[in-house]
Image (tube, grey):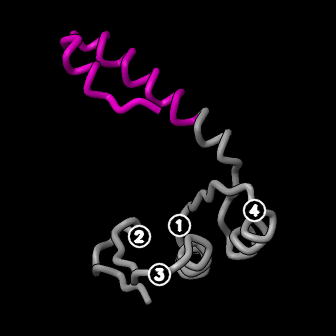
Amino acid sequence: MWRDLGSARPSDFLFARGQTADSIVERLASKYGQRFELMVATSDYLEQQTANACGAECISPDMLRGLMQEARTRAKRQLRVNGSSSAEQRRLPAV
């Protein structure tokens, strides 16, 4: 089982050992899908259907990778605009 840590952010959770990713996605989508904008990245059709039924948006893992690459590019550009050092830019995680 999982439990909410009590924060206002649905991203902070503890999960029991042995839980599947599918069960975690299903529980989070059913609990928060109507209250928050959730995005689930999965190529599993049944998981997409379940998440959509709970109010979450679904994208493919490739689409998620593209979104992350775009965000990284924007962050690097913003760092250059703000005059940051190349050392700060190197600390951005690769996607």
Q: Position of residue 82 (x, y in %)?
A: 25, 14
Disc 2 to disc 1, C-alpha distance = 9 Å
The answer to which of marks 2 and 3 sits earlier in the sequence is: 2
Q: Which corner quadrant of the image does residue 88 belong to? A: top left
Q: Which region shows up in magenta?
A: 67-95
Disc 4 to disc 1, C-alpha distance = 22 Å
- Residue 61 vs 90, above or below: the answer is below
**Marks 1 and 3 close (CB-CB < 8 Å):** no
The answer to which of marks 2 and 4 sits earlier in the sequence is: 2
Q: Residues within 10 Å of mark 3 (few under 14, many from 20)?
A: few
**Closer to the observer: label 2 or label 4?**
4
Disc 2 to disc 4, C-alpha distance = 22 Å
Say if residue 19 shows up in the picture. Answer: yes
Q: Which dot marks residue 18? A: 3
- Residue 73 vs 12, above or below: the answer is above
The amino acid type, in three-letter code, at marker 1 is Phe
Residue underneath mark 1: 36
**Marks 2 and 1 close (CB-CB < 8 Å):** yes
Q: Residues within 10 Å of mark 4 (few under 14, many from 20)?
A: few
Residue underneath mark 4: 44
Main SS type for the magenta part?
A: helix
Q: Which corner quadrant of the image does residue 86 belong to? A: top left
**Closer to the observer: label 2 or label 3?**
3
The answer to which of marks 4 and 1 sits earlier in the sequence is: 1
**Marks 4 and 3 close (CB-CB < 8 Å):** no
Who is closer to the viewer here, 66 or 36?
A: 66
**Closer to the observer: label 1 or label 3?**
3
Residue underneath mark 2: 10
Q: Residues within 10 Å of mark 2 (few under 14, many from 20)?
A: some
Give SS at disc 1: loop
